[in-house]
Image (cartoon, rainbow, N blue to C red):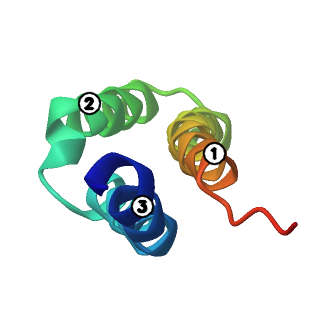
Amino acid sequence: RMWNVVLPQAMRIAIPPLGNQYLNLIKNSSLGAGIAYFELTNVTRITVGNGSPAVPAFAIALGIYIVISLVTSLGVNLANRRFRLVER
């Protein structure tokens, strides 16, 4: 009963808020240090400090942040589709 009834219903309810929490963790917490956010920002600052134009350097850093967030969002959306309610 647990695998066929309870778990699909619970997952259908839990996945959207859980996905939002994952995105918040990636963007706002120390999990970012594990994915090298700090190193990315530090390299960008050093690059700008050495005389490179600031806008392209920070645009590349922004692009990397967006890619990481979009990949996480894609995973959550795939999980939502997997557990969606099927109308008969």
Q: Is residue 46 above or below residue 88?
A: above
Based on the displayed image, in which of its 4 quarters is residue 45 positioned?
A: top left
Q: Mark number for residue 82?
A: 1
Residue neighbourhood size for the residue with mark 1, other residues' Cα within 10 Å, grouped as few (<14), some (14–19), many (≥20) = few
Q: Residue at x 42, y 61 (%)?
A: 5
Lower sequence index among marks 3 and 1: 3
Disc 2 + disc 1, Cβ < 8 Å: no
Of the image marks 2 and 3, the number of the one nearer the N terminus = 3
* Residue that badge 2 annotates: 35
**Which x, y percent locates residue 28?**
27, 64
Residue type at mark 3: give it: Val
Q: Is residue 87 left or right of residue 39?
A: right
Q: CA distance from mark 2 to mark 3?
A: 36 Å
Residue 5, numbered circle: 3
Of the residues shown, which amino acid type is indicated by label 1?
A: Arg
- Depth check: give the residue in front, 58 or 30: 30
In the rendered view of the protein, which quadrant contains the C terminus? bottom right
Of the 4 image quadrants, the one containing the N terminus is bottom left
Distance in Å between CA atoms under marks 3 and 1: 15 Å
Which residue is drawn at the image coordinates 35% and 65% (left, top)? Answer: 6
Q: Position of 29 compared to 48: left or right?
A: left
Amino acid type for the residue under numbered disc 2: Ile
Callout 1: SS: helix
Measured from the top left, where is residue 61 in percent x and y? 52, 37
